[in-house]
Image (cartoon, coloured by chain):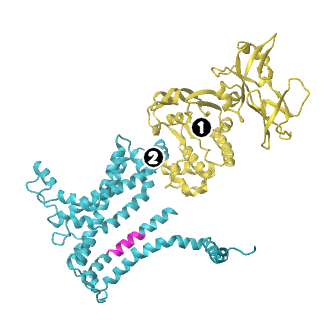
Chain colours: A cyan, B yellow
Amino acid sequence: MTTAPAGTVTQAVPLRLRERIRHWLDSEPVLAYLFMSPGWLILLLFMSYPFFLGIWISLTDRTVGLPSGEFVGFRNYAELLRDRTFHLTVMNTFIYGFVTVPFKLVLGLLLALLLNQAFPMRNVLRAALLLPWIVPTALSSLAWLMLYDAVLSPFSWLLKNWGLIESNIAFLGTRTNAIISLCIANIWRGTPFFAVAILAGLQAVPQELHEAAAIEGANRVQRFLAVTLPVIKGILVITTLFSIIWTFADFQLVYVLTKGGPANSTHIFGTYAWQIGIGGAGKLGIGAAISLYMFPVLAVLSAILLRYVRSQEA
Amino acid sequence: MAQVIYDHVTKRFDGVIAVNDLTLEVKDGEFLVLVGPSGCGKTTALRCLAGLEEVTSGDIIIGDRVVTHIPPKDRDIAMVFQNYALYPHMTVYENMAFGLKLRKMPKQEIDRRVKEVAEMLGIQDLLNRKPRQLSGGQRQRVALGRAIVREPQVFLMDEPLSNLDAKLRVQTRGELIKLQRRLGVTTIYVTHDQVEAMTMGHRIAVMNQGVLQQLDTPENLYDHPANLFVATFIGSPAMNIFPARVVTGEGTVRLVAGDVTLEAPAEHRGRLAEYANREVLVGIRPEDLIVQPGQVSEDRQLRLPVEIVEPLGSETLVHLRGPAGALIAKADPHLHFSPGELASVRVKIEHMHAFDPQTELALF
């Protein structure tokens, strides 16, 4: 009668183990690391590994198709400094990033202010506004390709019909035209992000602040400058920095519209790195070096962004 | 400083009447409290005066100017909001100076006024801080200071104390009263708190469902409520109300409710006689029921069972089983009551109220 069922004896050990695991999981530091580990894993696998691999490749003469290359130190970087196309690429990227963003900011702000007013069908318009941002860039870029077509462009057709021009505009035919065209398409695609972010910010401005200012004697413009703008300042800074970073790292729009042409004159970092590294020459080492030249700029911008976000949290 | 007049002001929102034909005159230098339950239209009435809401019909007069269609900034008023509405990116000094700067006042004058008012409110050490670095009480003072520096004709205050904790609220209440009496600026103060209303206002306007119920001094509201709503809204716990039948006899008028019979006060017999053999609503404040535990051999005493006892320290609330539902009585805190036992109750007949059951207007 005192014989215990066989099961309980063999279970005693796992039970104690389970107890220990449970005890261990009760500890907050252990749990904290446990919860962070998936994030760390993703960062290591998909961010850190490719990043460091990229740095390594940029220091070799590796090419597509060959298993590995020789270590060449900073030769790739030095070579790029003598490359005229690379010089153009750097200039283009800065023009692309720093010319489009102010337009996106101002247009986005105006759109947000407009959409913050009450009028019929406002919600429909708000949703429609997001379209350029939602539609995959590869697709919308194709639409722009058609709009900029040397023969079929509706812009040229319209202007010709109005008698403003005599022959079609070569939207993508010269460097200046192509860069302006790229910037316009980029502004079209990026403005909704600003508008939506700023609209969210505007809706967070307490109505009472406007009322208080109105009673104190501020007109609409004064209220915008003294109340609205300071309250949404944080959002303006953050969206601007994000947009600069994204524009710097763009690829699709330029790749679809010009592929860097004419005559390699409209490349930005992304497209030139692709062309040298994979597309044409297959020189992976130099391609990686081109991408990494972008790194310091993006690192500085990201650092400013992070610092700003943290200072706002404090 | 100025008088304020609401002249048949009505405000509709999409078919909902928020303020219904409000006519009200606030005297120069008066502290008038607008009080009522939430949704009664008191805040809307204030916002109409501020110019933050356009009135649907009627006129608003400040001083001797009709301001009905004048924008807020030209009405010469200052408003203190419930959430203070301090500009988060400005320091206390800048918050207070903002309105003066907009009016292109010389810098030295702004500086003098801001510092003087800051001193008056005891916030002179906070002038360089941002609102988020301040406690609730300090923010409240800054909001008040911002209104005072403007030296407006009228102060509008929309529940300015409701975000403070109970202790600070009582303290600030007192300071606000002193301040208003000292500055002598006409003040219109909105609250849902009847204690604030009773303690602060020279006169109180009680509102319900957009309609002004009664405009009177705190004493008169308490002693002579115009209708059932005011009677039950003012006073805490609320006035006990129960229906009773009017029975007239030889030279007497009695009020009979269940097995309780009350002798009507002599001066109101005539008024009650009009309701002979009909029902009226009898109102008795908890403080007008004198309760004692056990049986007291005295005339005109009721004996009612005790249901709940709530000792509050300064007084004890005794819930009695009355003729129609519970009757609450305020008792001496040193008396001991037990639920289930009988208590002796004497009604202060002279403080009794009666209301018409249909119109709910006070008979006396």
In the picture, measured across the screen, residue A201 lies left or right of residue A164, that is right
The single residue placed furthest to the front in the displayed view is: A1
**Horizontal and vertical percent position of residue B360:** 64, 22
Residue at the spot of label 1: B189
- Tag 1: residue type? Tyr
**Horizontal and vertical percent position of residue B223:** 72, 27
Q: Residue at x 46, y 40 (%)?
A: B73
Q: Is residue B173 magenta?
A: no
Question: Which sits earlier in the primary sequence, circle 2 or circle 1?
Answer: 2
Which quadrant would the N terminus of chain B be assigned to in this image? top right
- Tag 2: residue type? Leu
Q: Nearer the viewer, residue B252 or B113?
A: B252
Of all chains, the one bearing label 1 is B
Of all chains, the one bearing label 2 is B
Q: Nearer the viewer, residue B82 or A60?
A: A60
Residue at the spot of label 2: B102
